[in-house]
Amino acid sequence: MPFAPDDYNMKVLLGLPFAGRYVPPMWAVTLSALCWPMNIKHALYPVQGKPREQAREEIIEKAIELKSKYVMMLDDDVVPPADAPMLMVRELEMHDEFDVIGGIVTAKGVNADPMLFKGSSGGPYWKWKVGEIFEVDEIATACIVIRTSLFQTLPKPWFRDLNTLEEEKEAGVYAEPKDVNEILHKGEMTDDIFFCKKAKAAGHRILAHGGILCRHYDQFGNAFTLTEDSYPFWPPVPHIMDIRDAMKIDGWMSPLELAWLAQWAKVSSNIVEIGSFQGRSTKALVQNTKGTVTAIDSWNEDPTLSREIAVAGNRINTVMPPNYLYEEFMRNLGEHTNLTVMRGKSLDAAASMNGDKFDMIFIDASHDYAAVKADIEAWKPKLAPGGVLCGHDFDPVKWPDVVRAVNELLPEAKLAVDSIWMWQEGK
């Protein structure tokens, strides 16, 4: 017996408005890995061969037909974190006063300005922190969840690309300019701004989720996202000086993670770091502790990694010279007298430290399951009472082996900030 519309009661319909442009491979990978709230009905609805505004309207109509509580839209050039649907739906489930929530999508350009706005003609809104959820007036619809009931009271058109003042007037969104700046900007309006203005005018409120940082791809495969030196990434003011030098060193540790390490270093006197690379995290530790730091790494050269370093550091040569990583680390850290450097394997170093105890142990070495498990088993016994055992890259999408090893050996471990996990005995 076929299903009737009354039987559907969909929770989330994910609409995919294809624009006929380059689709990055990571988009397809992420689409298959999206995390959804438990025990819900959700479905995909792609629309091809239509202008973007028409594609969005068709997606909304399908959501209404299927009695879907929410409609999510994901553009074909935007790659969100895998947990974006779960995070956005959760916020709307908990906050009935809001009907729209969007992830952070930036413009395609060097500055990568976030496409979210407060007020008219004020430019991108910057004064928020990564992880913060805050109200806005307008936001890009490239990664967004909307309560479908909104459209049942909002007259069509819901989405329009406008290019002239006459089109604004015809669509009913024209407002008399208040100053010369508004005059200069009148006449152009993208479909997402059109939707937000119309929804706001009808009394609907909009959220931006600062924990959903998307990558926005151009036709050449270049990805754009927030830069790490932008305001949303700035730690609280007292911490900025703590990590200023660390941020100058190449590496993958975010400013928030560096600030977290710096704060723990302030209350730790005997620290060991397993996996130091070029010293970005080591710098945050050694500059902020009144005690000592032991940095352990093999600093072995890896041709694949060397090419990646060359790109990240904008170096011309793609093959690093022998001992490059070690020498770079020493150039960055060699001045510190409270630093002990041990070049070798993690397990050998652990075995050589008979009765030594550390009040902070940070693991960021090999990321395969066996290596992470071995490091935890080798170093956990060396944790002093009340100390913190922690590590990097607790990310189920990028580093599932890290997550698996930590969860198996330290089930009480928790996510501290970004992708740093931490564990303290009895806590």
Image (cartoon, rainbow, N blue to C red):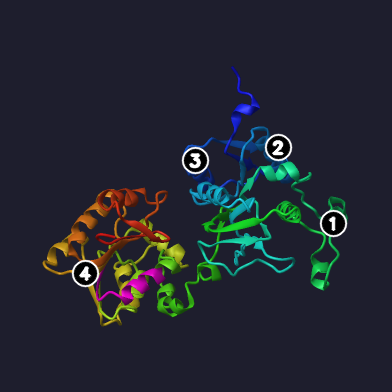
C-beta proximity under 8 Å, tags 4 and 2: no
- Between the residue at mark 1 and the residue at mark 3, the CA separation in whole angstroms equals 39 Å
In the rendered image, residue 28, in percent from the top left (x then y), is placed at 52, 43
C-beta proximity under 8 Å, tags 2 and 3: no
Q: Quadrant of residue 48?
A: top right
- The residue wearing badge 4 is 358
**Magenta extent:** 258-273
Mark 2 or mark 3, earlier in chain: 3
- Between the residue at mark 1 and the residue at mark 2, the CA separation in whole angstroms equals 27 Å
Q: Quadrant of residue 421?
A: bottom left
Res. 364 in view: no
Whether residue 268 appears in magenta in the rendering, the answer is yes
* Classed neighbour count for the residue bearing mark 4: other residues with Cα under 10 Å, few (<14), some (14–19), many (≥20): many
Where 371 falls versus 262 (above or below)? above
In the rendered image, residue 150, in percent from the top left (x then y), is placed at 69, 46
Q: Secondary structure at mark 1?
A: loop
Using the image, tell me which numbered label, if any, was put on residue 164. Answer: 1
Question: Farthest residue toward the top?
Answer: 1
Q: Between tags 1 and 4, which lies in front? A: 4
Q: Between tags 1 and 2, which lies in front? A: 2
| Residue at x-position 64% and y-position 33% | 66
- Between the residue at mark 2 and the residue at mark 3, the CA separation in whole angstroms equals 24 Å
Which amino acid type is marked by label 2? Glu
Q: How many marks?
A: 4
Q: Quadrant of residue 121?
A: bottom right
Res. 28 in view: yes
| Residue at x-position 30% and y-position 75% | 267
Mark 1 or mark 2, earlier in chain: 2
Quarter containing the C terminus: bottom left
Quarter containing the N terminus: top right
- The residue wearing badge 2 is 61
Q: Secondary structure at mark 2?
A: helix
